[in-house]
Image (spheres, grey):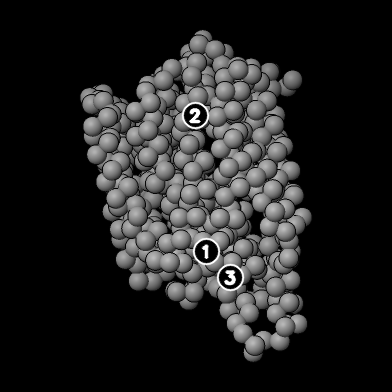
Amino acid sequence: MLAVAMVVVLGAIMSILDITVVNVALKHLTEDFDAPLSTIQWVATGYTLALATVIPVTGWASARFGTKRLYMISIGLFVAGSALAGMAWSAESLILFRVLQGLGGGMIMPAGMTILTQAAGPSRVGKVMSIVGIPMLLGPIAGPILGGWLVDDVSWRWIFYINVPLGALALVLAWRVLKRDEPRPAERLDFPGLLLLSPGLAGLIYGLATGAEKSDFGRTDVLITTIGGVVLVLGFMVRALQRGNTNPLIDLRLFRRRSVAAASGTMVLFACAFFGAMLILPLYYQVVRGESAFSAGLLLAPQGFGAMITMPIGGQLTDRVGPGKVVLGGLSIVVAGVALFASQLTVDASYWGLGAALFVMGLGMGMTMMPTMSAAMQTLAHDEVPRASTALNIIQQVAGSIGTAFIAVLLTAQMESRGLGGGGGMAAEAPSGAQIPPQMIADIMNKMADAFQTTYWWSLALLTLAFLPALLLPRRKPVESGLDGKDDAPVDAPVMMH
């Protein structure tokens, strides 16, 4: 079990590290490609969006080809995309190769979760989720530090090239350690559902992000992509819920259960607010405080250390007292941490104070993410786990895509409203020497800090809304009988009235 967990974690580390190392490189990418933040953010958003669009086939592919084979294929595709991203010659080419990277990375986490969950057992689901959460501990710590060092002392291209040797190691270990699983006779792939859902999600997110970026949701291209995306997603939902459809791409009937529906709602709001806020965090240290990428990475480490402390505790508490109580406690800590951080965002805020706020945020994150996932998974039957894993990962990635796009565009708008230009102008507005009077420099820096602070207050408001669905999470510990799926009430059952 431990060997299997280590193989899965190694693959997951690559996909999660790739998000955090890119965040710390955004400032350098805007300068090297002479592109605004609203464009460069698609390096992150395009990756997570690609994750979301490929995840729907993971459940079917796991049964059709076997989880071991699928896991190795996804790692291989991810490594190929990484190598190409390292060779990118423009912002557009980098975004394209990041999408290719995401097509492989999107299957790593759900396939790995399926391997671990099915190998563990119902009473250890919380502990299993804690193991899967290890990459989320290492990502916030090692990712920014490693990325900062590579960006400052080597080249930003190596934040992608480094995945090549890691991926090769993961492939060798997966081939040797994971048991050979014979593909089960799988049901036919819901190809019409795939044609509706994947482009629908892409169109919806792209339309919303573009409309926010241009501050004009009435543009023809924005209306076409957004409305088209909504129509396709609604068409998928109608088709998936039809009685005659016995094999939908995503089993939406699972969301009739209160725990699955509540966990999904909590995850949407949390991921949208928190991951979006994490995107611009390194920019504050680099643009407003003038720190190098490596220093910014070090300054982000307290968040990872906080999560490292509470992630295993959260898993154990989930198995003992139920996920609802753990998630509510974790959300409360996260909200307190974000509020403490936002209140200090000035040009001369104490690094110790900011670090303490990040540490508190990490403590809360470690008791929120995996317990939320556990809340949905603990009451599912063995055969329902792959489909539920697929659905929940789609929700998390789509919410993360929306959050990164929304927060980046919001920060750009805050900059422009203060006369600082767009995201691409942030570095240009920074002090460049004696040509800029000291008073003007101070004024620019104060305006920038104020733009970051306002953006974080918006993130806090969105994060607070996550309490509403979290109140509906189960507050009892999981039991063996829960795996038949019968002890969990549908969302429309009377229990929701209490």
Mark 1 crowdedness (10 Å alpha carbons): few <14, some 14-19, many ≥20:
many
Instruction: Name the N-terminal-most of marks 1 and 3.
Output: 1
Mark 2 crowdedness (10 Å alpha carbons): few <14, some 14-19, many ≥20:
many
Front in this rendered view, residue 466 or 340: 340
Could you tell me which secondary element the residue under label 3 belongs to?
helix
Looking at the image, which residue is at 50% across and 11% down? 480
What is the quadrant of the N terminus in the image? top left
Instruction: Name the N-terminal-most of marks 3 and 2.
Output: 2
Distance from label 3 to label 2 (Cα)? 37 Å
Q: Percent from the top left, x then y, of residue 409?
A: 60, 63
Q: Which amino acid does label 2 sit on?
A: Met
Image: 466 above or below 321 = below
**Quarter assignment of residue 69:** top left
Q: Percent from the top left, x then y, of residue 95?
A: 41, 62
Could you tell me which secondary element the residue under label 1 belongs to?
helix
Residue 406 appearing in the image: no
Distance from label 1 to label 3 (Cα)? 17 Å
Could you tell me which secondary element the residue under label 2 belongs to?
helix
From the image, state whether disc 3 or disc 2 is nearer to you: 2
Count of numbered marks: 3
497 lies left or right of 165: right
Looking at the image, which residue is at 60% across and 33% down? 310
From the image, state whether disc 1 or disc 3 is nearer to you: 1
Q: Which numbered disc covers residue 129?
A: 2
Looking at the image, which residue is at 60% across and 55% down? 299
Residue receiving disc 1: 293
Q: Percent from the top left, x then y, of residue 73?
A: 27, 42
Residue receiving disc 3: 423
